[in-house]
Image: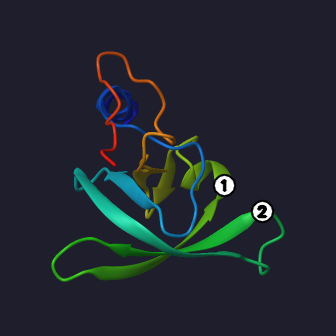
């Protein structure tokens, strides 16, 4: 999974935060897959002692699939690989505008035409 994430970081522009309305890239092992989802809700999970969040997303598949994951902030912001059912997962919001895009070697930012 670490190798996959390292390769993704070379070609994708990621955000450091995850907010409602963001599109996130999700990488999974077993089965190996990459998919996009839209974050619909982020709510504190008060049933847990530590800092956990309920992240409601719609996976952009045909048909779209609603999911609700309980994650810590490092897990939902790409800082940490996590497991679900014993299988590794990675999730991070993609940059949607030039202002959000970090500089990536060899890739020029897209400029908006006004």
Residue nearest the observer in this picture, 14 or 7: 14
Q: Quadrant of residue 107?
A: top left
Query: In the image, is residue 16 above or below residue 57?
Result: above
Residue at 40% in and 31% down:
2
Q: What x and y, as percent, mark residue 81?
A: 50, 44
Q: Residue furthest left?
A: 62
| SS type, badge 1 | helix
Q: Position of residue 61 (x, y in %)?
A: 21, 73
Query: Whole-percent x and y of residue 32?
Result: 22, 50
Residue visible at 23% across and 53% down?
33
Q: Nearer the viewer, residue 81 or 38?
A: 38
Name the image quarter holding the N terminus.
top left
Q: Which residue is mark 2?
A: 51
As drawn, is 91 to the left or to the right of 62? right
Marks 1 & 2, CB-CB < 8 Å contact:
yes
Question: What residue is shown with label 1?
Answer: 73
Image-quadrant location for residue 7: top left
Earlier residue among tags 1 and 2 = 2
Q: Furthest residue to the front?
A: 114
Is 76 on the left-hand or right-hand side of 106? right
Distance from Cα at disc 1 to Cα at disc 2: 8 Å
Going by the picture, which residue comes out furthest to the top?
A: 106
Q: Nearer the viewer, residue 25 or 84?
A: 25
For residue 5, the mark is none
For mark 1, does the 10 Å Cα neighbourhood hold few (<14), some (14 to 19), or many (20 or more) residues?
some
Query: Around disc 2, counting alpha carbons within 10 Å, would you say few (fewer than 14), some (14 to 19), or many (20 or more)?
Result: few
Residue 58 vs 17, above or below: the answer is below
Q: Is residue 45 above or below residue 97?
A: below
The secondary structure type at the circle numbered 2 is: loop
**Residue 112 image offset from top left, x and y in percent:** 34, 44
* Of residues 48 and 8, the one drawn nearer to the viewer in this rendering: 8
């Amino acid at each position: 999974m670490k190798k996959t994430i390292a390769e993704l970081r070379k070609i994708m522009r990621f955000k450091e935060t995850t907010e409602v309305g963001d599109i996130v890239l999700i990488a999974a092992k077993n089965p190996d897959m990459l998919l996009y989802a839209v974050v619909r809700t982020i709510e504190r999970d008060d049933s847990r002692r530590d800092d956990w969040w309920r992240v409601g997303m719609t996976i952009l598949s045909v048909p779209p699939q609603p999911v609700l994951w309980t994650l810590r902030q490092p897990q939902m912001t790409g800082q940490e690989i996590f497991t679900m059912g014993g299988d590794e997962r990675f999730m991070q919001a993609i940059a949607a505008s030039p202002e959000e895009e970090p500089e990536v070697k060899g890739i020029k930012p897209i400029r908006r035409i006004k």
